[in-house]
Image (cartoon, coloured by chain):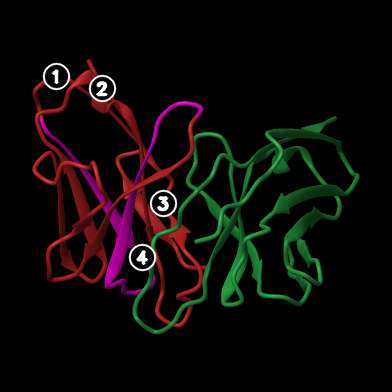
Amino acid sequence: GAVVSQHPSWVICKSGTSVKIECRSLDFQATTMFWYRQFPKQSLMLMATSNEGSKATYEQGVEKDKFLINHASLTLSTLTVTSAHPEDSSFYICSATPPGQLEKLFFGSGTQLSVL
Amino acid sequence: DAKTTQPTSMDCAEGRAANLPCNHSTISGNEYVYWYRQIHSQGPQYIIHGLKNNETNEMASLIITEDRKSSTLILPHATLRDTAVYYCIVRAGYSGGGADGLTFGKGTHLIIQP
């Protein structure tokens, strides 16, 4: 199956700093990637849709200025959590769909963010 | 997308078949049933999907009732590594307009007992 790589797996940062998370499609090109957030013991919540070469589409209630998404190439999307605060501590997961398999989503392994 | 209802948790003995039910009584004619699972602290993994016919792959079987209002995911010989949260998701089929993100419910926490 298609491989989606996410980096880093976990990150600890101080409150007020920014953190960048990378999502790469290793063996396919993805014009669209998706970013999710998951709090402990809760389900995944779609945050935004990342579109290669254009602006991301954010779900209602997600602050676009706080969660910056850049999809500069067909294999890389980045999520930057700006001025992180403890309430931003969460598990962030990206996903992508290979051309020809648009009915399936392949997910990265996730990034656990802890803001102190 | 139609709403789904799943039991919160289930236990199954190792080596036995695990049958996970899902109710989707408001499913529309163009909506598929998808199953994903999430092992603790990992990203979700695609398992199987179907429209109205039963489906089988190397991971599982999907049985959809004739009226399509419910379905069952079957893991034929459960192992300890199958312990995970299983999500049943109903969504419209890909229509050529581009990929869509999935909406996850709370899923079923399946615990395989040794």
The location of residue B34, given as percent across then percent down, is: 61, 62
Q: Nearer the viewer, mark 1 or mark 3?
A: 1
Residue A77: which quarter of the image?
bottom left
As measured in the structure, the alpha-carbon distance from the residue carrying label 2 to the one carrying label 1 is 10 Å
As measured in the structure, the alpha-carbon distance from the residue carrying label 1 to the one carrying label 3 is 25 Å
Q: Could you tell which of marks 1 and 3 lies nearer the N-terminus? A: 1
Which mark is drawn over residue A15? 1
Residue numbers of the magenta segment: A18-41
The location of residue B74, given as percent across then percent down, is: 80, 55
Q: Hey, which residue is sitting farthest front in the picture?
A: B26
Q: Chain of mark 4?
A: A
Q: Secondary structure at mark 1?
A: loop
* Number of residues whose C-alpha sits closer than 10 Å to that of mark 3, classed few (under 14), some (14–19) or many (20 or more): many
Residue annotated with mark 4: A26
Q: Chain of mark 1?
A: A
Is A23 part of what is drawn in magenta? Answer: yes
Q: Could you tell which of marks 3 and 4 lies nearer the N-terminus? A: 4
Is B35 part of what is drawn in magenta? Answer: no
Residue annotated with mark 3: A108
* Number of residues whose C-alpha sits closer than 10 Å to that of mark 4, classed few (under 14), some (14–19) or many (20 or more): few
Check the rendered structure and report the hue given to chain A: red
> Hey, what amino acid is under mark 2?
Glu
Q: Secondary structure at mark 4?
A: loop
Q: Residue at x 71, y 51 (%)?
A: B22
Check the rendered structure and report the hue given to chain B: green
